[in-house]
Amino acid sequence: MESDKYSKEIDIAVRVVHMACSLCQMVQKGLVSTDSDQVKSKDDDSPVTVADWSVQATVSWILSEIFGSQNVSIVAEEDVKTLSKADSADLLAAVVNTVNECLADAPKYGLQRPDKVLGALQILEAISRCNSTGGPMGRHWILDPVDGTLGFVRKDQYAIALALMEDGQVVLGILGCPNYPMKKEWLNFHHEHYQNMYQLSPPSLDSWEEGCVMYARRGSGEAWMQPLVHGDKKFEWPNSARRIRVSSIDDPSLATFCESVEKANSNHSFTAGVAHSVGLRKQPLRVYSMVKYAAIARGDAEIFMKFARSGYKEKIWDHAAGVVIVEEAGGVVTDAGGRPLDFSRGVFLEGLDRGIVACSATLHEKIIGAVYASWDSSNL
């Protein structure tokens, strides 16, 4: 990967996502409940936390420092509306403190820390700078600072997702999954159960290792996974990276499929119909966030299907990083009509045919066929 034209970009992006994972773990430890004053509701009632704003500020600041703010266009999920309110002074102070604490650790990841502590205005500016709407021309970073915030506040699965799009095509994808267990069998347990087991039986030979960063470059035919950097260790490239591949299972009756936990924007009943039609026999693995793409890329599950409820529009930051990682790991990601996803038309995945399907190439045709077969009898 060192010799390609995006070697600097992927090197910086992987390091900053590792930093963001550490930041999220720090914030998550301090969260007592979903009612915490560090958790707010957005206009659409979805939660947003100190971690969302802090990750966005940190990633924005690092990318702007390294590549020059005039050269950096970032499409990202959060804005400063809530943080700028008069009654949000404590929330803003918590974000400022979290960002500075994270940036002070930058040398651990081989990155430059600021010369002096950043003030509230600088941090608000870093968050506000992520106001691009993308499009078919130029270079745009696409960031979801905490994908699956509900999973995050429930101390379950969530992801930090960063992608780079050039002239309408996603060319790099980096996915940080701080609670993603390195062993497949632990996926079935809630993260807190996993933590309790960890305390009862300290890790040996990395058997309990948890948390990873996955990354891929378009056209390389390779996707990689690194463990998180724990304790006082320093990040050193390639940080024990190993290649990941999608599952080779081609029999639907043996396949595991992932779907969203939340029913608010997903049609679980239609997905169940497709699963039955194609011959899937296992119970679905319901996972928060883009960790579903991670599970497909690593071969822990074979199929991810999402069919949005009427009126819901998919955002590009919820898919960009995961799609390129799955594809370079040997998988296929399309809409339900079998067409590639188009990230070049603004913040939404415009022109999406019914839903999204991610799986191995051998299963793809069967899934798309089952979607068509189930469509006529559905009331989606």
Image (cartoon, rainbow, N blue to C red):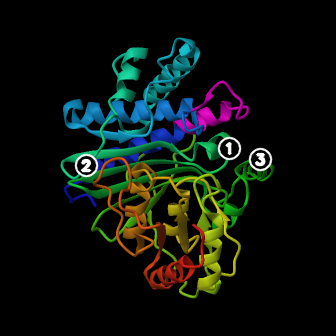
Q: Is residue 292 left or right of residue 269?
A: left
Q: Amino acid at mark 2?
A: Gly
Q: Amino acid at mark 1?
A: Lys
1 or 3: mark nearer the eye = 1
Q: What's under tag 3, amino acid-wise?
A: Gln
Q: Is 6 left, or right, of 226 in this rendering?
A: left
Give how far across and how far down residue 125 sits, in percent.
35, 22
Q: Residue 169: image x %, image y %?
A: 26, 58
Residue nearest the viewer, comparing 363 with 380: 380
Question: Which residue position holds label 2?
Answer: 135
Q: Earlier in the sequence, mark 1 or mark 2?
A: 2
Disc 3 packing (10 Å; few <14; some 14–19; many ≥20): few
Mark 1 lies on a secondary structure that is loop
The image shows residue 273 at horizontal and vertical percentages of 63, 76
Q: Quadrant of the N terminus?
A: bottom left
| Dot label at residue 155 | 1
* Residue visible at 59% across and 59% down in the picture: 266
